[in-house]
């Protein structure tokens, strides 16, 4: 950890020092560490600076828990809910890991607000930091995208309906709305392709982009340098600089421990719930998005007709553009918040409106007795579902699944097929074994009459293979033929 | 790699030398964080190792009182459930419940140890007869005559909460000793 070339290790040095020297010779680790840890902070370490590294920490935690969840997850509309319920109810620590991941997304949103708030109040986007700010804006959008795509993956009632509402909004986009909506959903309606698309975005595309833009964000931050406190000149700092390590690192580390502690406490106390499986035919379900999207949801309720286009799409788009362009038009180097009432005031106003809309949404739901009752019922349904033991899914191709809706004749044929131990040679569902060939597709090769005849008096090839005449009553034989006919 | 901020030209940064104490502090907090996450993560991944023992391979045959008074073997259809994590594959198969001897229930697999046909119980002859190559077995499933290389295969049975249960298994055909097939 020095700038001088490392000296030859001697026997007197302890093991750690010798290992350090050995490693540094081969990797240059000491100068990398120096570069990373000795980042100068004008004015020294502060608690106000912990949010960025807190975000990085939570992002890493999301990656780790996300990879582990992927061990059990299947992105398909007919399995997603079963596997998440398997994770929650059967797999050890499954509920905990899923809760850390799900609550982690809320944690990231909260930290994003704090991180942006600190940047705005401290004016730390000023002084050659436009790219730093822009990369941050992209990260914000990507994170909101992660929250939106991840929400659908459990495929329970609230996930399904919230995402249905969310993607409905896309159709409002001028000109390209409807085709864009179809593209995102993978069709006109929500379905298994929607889930696949959200999964690919959530697991491959967005994390890849996030990692690239986090790298860019950190690079721009290091290039511009820490902005320091509000009285500091953002381009030519005057205050004595103190390295990032150890004081700021210590604060960041404490914050990381606090963050994971809070997440773990919430995850243990109120595990993230999973509702009943999505039922698109359920017309009573009242969709509500996650809390951070709730204010926007409430805002849309106030708009109707062409106002929903103006207020729901154009206004947010314009606000987002103004937000992203902030360091381009706010070019004064003045950083004290009381000297910058417009920017700081606009941000505070946004926060107030955002919180009020969220509160209004809750109040609206509580005020309408019908809605309140339905919301209560939905909560109770989710609670009840969590209490029930895990029910495995009948595998496709297993007779129980295949024959759930089969005609009674076929079901009877299956019972005969199994009771006659036909399956011991011809395999379950006639897929064939080493002892005898498959029966799948015999329905295409033979007529019913031929099948009946072959069962009663097998041909010589069949007899040589060990097949015996089937000695059953006429209607039983017909049922067996009906069963054989539908094997595929 | 050199990222010296131009905003800090001329500022001399002195690295601190209290590293060992702080390293211990960071080590401690790192250990705290990782324990909080690592223990559940390890348990999460290793779940299948612990799962196996709990796997239930017993199928219900029926209430015990249905079988206490029988005097001849009775064919029963059972449901076989194979659990594959969050999926089940179910199929039906038949077994023979024999009259209990000294309170012990005995259950036979109907699969002929010769080539796997379904052995039938023929009441008037008081014998099990395999329809395929006329293998003959006593009412206890002991081999009497015919090509089968061994007696009929018995299955593990137990009574739980008044319900007779069986552990259904497949056995290798054409060999004189009973070998289970995986
Ligand atoms: S299969 Fe039973 S005697 Fe040949």
Image (spheres, coloured by chain):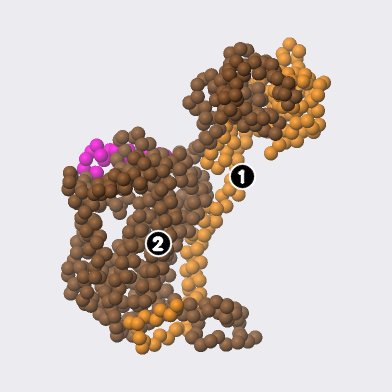
Chain colours: A brown, B orange
Name the residue tied to disc 2. A210
| Furthest residue toward front | A445
Q: Please indicate, yes or no, whether residue A162 appears anywhere in the rendered image.
A: no
For residue A13, above or below residue A76: below
> Which range is magenta?
A365-385
| Nearer to us in this view, A409 or A8 | A409
Q: Is the magenta stretch mostly helix, strand or loop?
A: helix
Looking at the rendered structure, whether the residues under marks 2 and 1 are on a common chain is answered as: no
Q: Please indicate, yes or no, whether residue A78 appears anywhere in the rendered image.
A: yes
Name the residue tied to disc 1. B52
Mark 1 Cα within 10 Å, few/some/many (few <14, many 20+)?
few
- At a point 55% along the width and 79% down the height, the residue shown is A24
Q: Position of residue A153 (x, y in %)?
A: 41, 47
Residue A382: say if magenta.
yes
| Furthest residue toward right | B145
Q: Chain letter of disc 2?
A: A
């Amino acid at each position: 950890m020095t700038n001088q070339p490392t000296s030859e290790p001697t026997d007197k040095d302890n093991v750690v020092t010798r290992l350090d020297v050995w490693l540094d010779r081969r990797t240059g680790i000491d100068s990398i560490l120096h570069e990373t840890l000795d980042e100068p902070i004008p004015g020294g370490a502060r608690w106000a600076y912990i949010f960025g590294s807190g975000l990085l920490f939570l992002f890493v935690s999301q990656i780790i828990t996300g990879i582990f969840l992927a061990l059990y997850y299947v992105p398909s509309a007919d399995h997603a809910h079963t596997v998440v319920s398997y994770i929650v109810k059967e797999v050890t620590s499954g509920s905990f890991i899923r809760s850390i991941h799900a609550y982690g997304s809320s944690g990231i949103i909260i930290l994003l607000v704090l991180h942006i708030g600190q940047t705005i109040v401290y004016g730390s986007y000023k002084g050659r930091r436009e790219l730093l700010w822009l990369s941050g804006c992209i990260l914000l959008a990507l994170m909101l995208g992660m929250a939106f795509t991840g929400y659908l993956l459990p495929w329970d009632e609230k996930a399904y309906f919230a995402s249905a509402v969310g993607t409905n909004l896309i159709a409002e986009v001028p000109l390209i709305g409807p085709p864009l909506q179809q593209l995102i959903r993978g069709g006109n309606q929500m379905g298994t392709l929607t889930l696949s698309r959200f999964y690919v975005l959530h697991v491959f595309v967005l994390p890849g982009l996030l990692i690239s833009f986090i790298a860019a964000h950190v690079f721009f931050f290091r290039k511009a340098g820490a902005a320091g406190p509000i009285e500091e000149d953002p381009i030519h700092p005057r205050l004595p600089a103190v390295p990032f390590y150890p004081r700021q690192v210590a604060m960041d580390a404490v914050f990381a421990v606090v963050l994971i502690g809070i997440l773990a406490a919430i995850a243990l106390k109120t595990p993230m719930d999973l509702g009943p499986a999505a039922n698109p035919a359920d017309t009573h379900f009242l969709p509500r998005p996650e809390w951070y999207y709730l204010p926007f949801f409430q805002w849309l309720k106030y708009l109707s007709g062409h106002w929903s286009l103006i207020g729901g799409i154009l206004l947010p788009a314009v606000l987002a553009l103004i937000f992203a362009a902030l360091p381009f038009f706010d070019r004064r180097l003045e950083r004290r918040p009381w000297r910058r009432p417009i920017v700081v005031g606009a941000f505070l106003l946004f926060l107030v409106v955002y919180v009020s809309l969220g509160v209004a949404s809750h109040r609206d739901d509580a005020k309408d007795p019908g809605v309140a009752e339905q919301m209560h019922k939905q909560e109770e349904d989710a609670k009840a579902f969590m209490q029930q033991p895990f029910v495995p899914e009948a595998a496709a191709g297993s007779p129980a699944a295949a024959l759930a809706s089969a005609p009674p004749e076929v079901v009877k044929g299956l019972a005969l097929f199994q009771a006659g131990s036909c399956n011991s040679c011809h395999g379950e569902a006639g897929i064939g074994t080493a002892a005898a060939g498959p029966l799948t597709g015999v329905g295409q090769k033979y007529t019913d009459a031929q099948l009946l005849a072959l069962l009663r008096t097998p041909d010589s090839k069949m007899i040589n293979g060990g097949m015996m005449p089937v000695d059953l009553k006429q209607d039983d034989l017909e049922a067996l033929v009906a069963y054989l006919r539908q094997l595929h | 790699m050199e990222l010296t901020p131009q905003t800090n030209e001329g500022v001399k940064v002195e690295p601190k030398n209290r590293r060992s104490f702080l390293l211990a502090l960071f080590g401690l907090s790192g250990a705290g964080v990782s324990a909080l996450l690592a223990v559940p993560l390890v348990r999460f991944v290793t779940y299948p190792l612990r799962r196996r023992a709990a796997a239930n391979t017993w199928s219900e045959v029926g209430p015990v009182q249905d079988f206490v008074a029988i005097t001849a073997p009775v064919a029963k259809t059972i449901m076989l459930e194979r659990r594959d994590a969050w999926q089940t594959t179910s199929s039906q198969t038949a077994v023979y419940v024999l009259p209990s001897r000294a309170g012990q229930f005995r259950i036979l697999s109907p699969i002929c140890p010769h080539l796997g046909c379904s052995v039938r119980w023929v009441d008037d002859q008081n014998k099990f007869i395999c329809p395929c190559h006329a293998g003959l077995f006593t009412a206890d499933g002991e081999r009497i005559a015919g090509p089968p290389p061994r007696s009929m295969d018995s299955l593990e049975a137990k009574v739980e909460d008044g319900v007779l249960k069986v552990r259904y298994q497949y056995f290798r055909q054409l060999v004189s000793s009973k070998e289970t097939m995986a």
